[in-house]
Amino acid sequence: MTDLANWNYKTLNPKILVPIDGVKEILYQWMSMMTGNREPRPMTIEKYEAGVIYDDGTMKVTAIATKHCGGSHAFLLEAEGKRVLYTGDMTRTVEDFPHSVVEEGLDFLIGESAHFSTMKYVELLKDKPVKQVVITHHFAPNNQFLDAKKALDPLPMALAFDGMEFEI
Ligand SMILES: [Zn+2]
């Protein structure tokens, strides 16, 4: 976001995909505040719906609607034969977990655990074709994570922290 307000990049026209109406106006207001009311830099803001939202032949991104809040989505990233799912925030009941995407196989799952117990992942992922899991956006006590990791052994599972890197 800060780069959008950076005068050095003023000639770029980034395409920004947003899930709800009204974001364009808010972004322009924010830009105008950040840049001292100069004319907003060029930006192409497009609303997306669930489905394939990006595909350049190398990377494909599919948005999957979730129920955390209006416009919330999970994202499936596919490239070089690998599949990565980023769940984003989900509901407390996890009824919006994208089971069908998981059933088709994942090389990497980035799942949240701020709105339900990490132990939920045991029923969600037990014996599923998932190769690696990292839990982000977590507030749960570490023992919940450790119990889930133990129950899902030998599935590699980690709690995310800033700067972490993974081989997929
Ligand atoms: Zn949240």
Image (spheres, grey):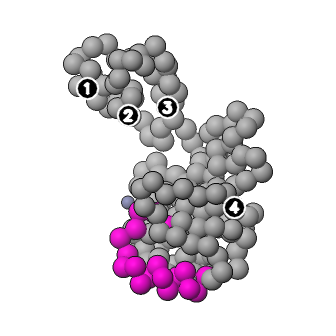
Can the viewer see residue 98? no
- The type of residue carrying mark 2 is Met
Residue visible at 57% across and 72% down in the picture: 157
Residue visible at 35% across and 23% down in the picture: 6
Which quarter of the picture shows residue 123? Answer: bottom right
- Mark 1: C-beta under 8 Å from nearest atom of ligand 1: no
Distance from disc 2 to disc 1, alpha carbons, whole Å, reads 10 Å
SS class of the residue under badge 4? loop
Residue 136 pos. (x, y %):
46, 63
Depth check: give the residue in front, 34 or 27.
34
Mark nearer the viewer, 4 or 3 = 4
SS class of the residue under badge 1? helix
SS class of the residue under badge 3? strand
- The type of residue carrying mark 4 is Asp
Mark nearer the viewer, 3 or 2 = 2
Distance from disc 4 to disc 3, alpha carbons, whole Å, reads 27 Å
Magenta range is 135-152
* 151 drawn magenta: yes
Q: Most extreme residue toward the right, as rendered?
A: 81
Which circle's residue, 4 or 1, is located before the other in the chain?
1
- The type of residue carrying mark 1 is Met
Distance from disc 3 to disc 2, alpha carbons, whole Å, reads 11 Å
Quarter of the image with the C terminus in it: bottom right
Which circle's residue, 4 or 2, is located before the other in the chain?
2
Horizontally, is 166 left or right of 100 in the view?
Answer: left
Q: Which residue is mark 4?
A: 107
Ligand 1 shows up in the quarter that is bottom left
3 and 1 marks in contact (CB < 8 Å): no
Tell me the tag on residue 34.
Answer: 1
